[in-house]
């Protein structure tokens, strides 16, 4: 095998570190001609103990439906953090277009989401759906997920270690969907994704580079239910996203 260039070595190192964070240290080795270069090298000298792991980004991009299904299977009936023992009913994975140009990421499931197994289906979810419609899109055209996939007891704010435990699966979802833009809904989502500890007033109104994808920050719909005065500010954020994606603004802004 010819020597690898620096960029390829770095990509392989990042991928191995990524799976290590999930607790996966052994990789299944396949013949080089059967898969792309990165996973073949990642398995060099490793034990063939995890044949189900899909390490190819190419496969994910060509069939995101299958890739998302694999991520969900890898999560399983997750017991990786304390939330599995604190009353959650089920995993709330994600929903929407697996090839969406726009992805919304919230904080955590609430009671309605925990009951139905789908993110943003309660009152805040209804408001998010209206926000999406105001952008000229339907809920089915975007992809929606949360930082964590289990409901915290009493809808409390997720702890940092809970976010860190669940984030690798979200990173895989983002990589698979490969959206053109991400909207982080609320402070928890924004601070977790950007690793920036700043107030919403400083986080909003600009674009961030998130692993090669543009990311914007706006208020969480649940916050807007408590403080409807911030809807106008949220609309400004969404208009910025619309402009980036080339979406036509409705003639009348939402109330």
Image (spheres, rainbow, N blue to C red):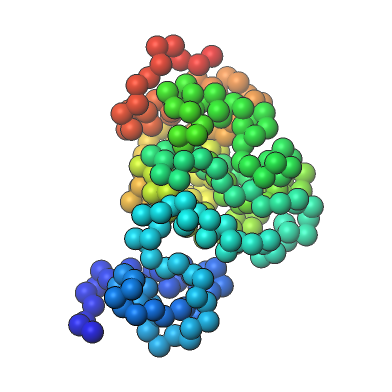
User: For the N terminus, which image quadrant?
Assistant: bottom left
Q: Note whether residue 30 is visible.
A: yes
Foreground of the two, 42 or 73: 73
Name the residue furthest front: 34
Horizontal arrangement in the rendering, residue 141 relative to residue 107 (left or right): left
Q: Which of 195/25 is in front?
A: 25
Q: Is residue 219 above or below residue 60?
A: above
248 displayed left or right of 185: left
Work out whether 56 lies above or below 68.
below
Residue drawn at (38%, 60%) of the image: 59
**Relative to 1, does residue 197 appear above or below in the rendering?**
above
User: In percent of the image, x 74 and y 42: which residue is there?
Assistant: 115
Extreme-top residue of the structure = 252
Looking at the picture, how far across and down is residue 185, in whole percent? 53, 38
- Vertical comparison of 169 with 136: above or below: below
As rendered, which of 111 and 36 lies closer to the eye? Answer: 36
Total numbered badges shown on the rendered structure: 0
Seen at 49% across and 70% down, the residue is: 53
Quadrant of the rendered image containing residue 141: top left
Residue 251 in picture, x, y percent from top left: 40, 11
Left/right placement of residue 29 relative to residue 32 reads right
157 or 173, which is in the foreground? 173
Q: Which residue is drawn at 44% across and 11% down?
A: 252
User: Is any part of residue 183 visible from this angle?
Assistant: no
Q: In which quarter of the image is the C terminus?
A: top right
48 to the left or right of 7: right
Residue 249 x %, y %: 38, 19
Q: Where is residue 7 in the image (x, y as percent from the top left)?
A: 25, 69
């Amino acid at each position: 095998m010819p020597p690898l260039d620096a960029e390829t070595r770095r990509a392989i190192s990042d991928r191995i570190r990524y799976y290590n964070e999930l607790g996966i240290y052994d990789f299944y080795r396949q013949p080089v001609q059967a898969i792309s270069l990165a996973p073949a090298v990642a398995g060099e000298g490793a034990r063939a103990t995890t044949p189900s792991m899909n390490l190819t980004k190419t496969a994910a991009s060509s069939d995101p439906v299958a890739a998302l299904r694999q991520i969900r299977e890898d999560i399983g009936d997750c017991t990786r953090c304390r939330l599995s023992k604190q009353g959650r009913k089920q995993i709330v994975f994600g929903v929407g277009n697996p090839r969406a140009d726009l992805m919304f990421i919230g904080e955590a499931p609430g009671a309605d989401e925990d009951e139905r197994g789908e993110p943003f289906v309660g009152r805040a979810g209804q408001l998010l759906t209206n926000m999406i419609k105001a952008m000229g899109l339907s809920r089915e055209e975007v992809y929606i997920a949360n930082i964590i996939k289990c409901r915290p007891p009493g809808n409390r704010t997720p702890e940092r270690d809970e976010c860190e435990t669940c984030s690798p699966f979200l990173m895989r979802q983002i990589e698979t969907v490969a959206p053109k833009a991400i909207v982080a809904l609320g402070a928890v989502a924004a601070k977790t994704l950007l690793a920036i500890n700043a107030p919403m007033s400083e986080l909003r109104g600009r674009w961030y580079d998130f692993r090669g994808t543009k990311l914007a920050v706006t208020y969480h719909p649940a916050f807007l239910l408590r403080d409807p005065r911030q809807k106008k500010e949220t609309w400004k954020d969404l208009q910025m996203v619309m402009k980036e994606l080339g979406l036509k603004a409705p003639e009348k802004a939402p109330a």
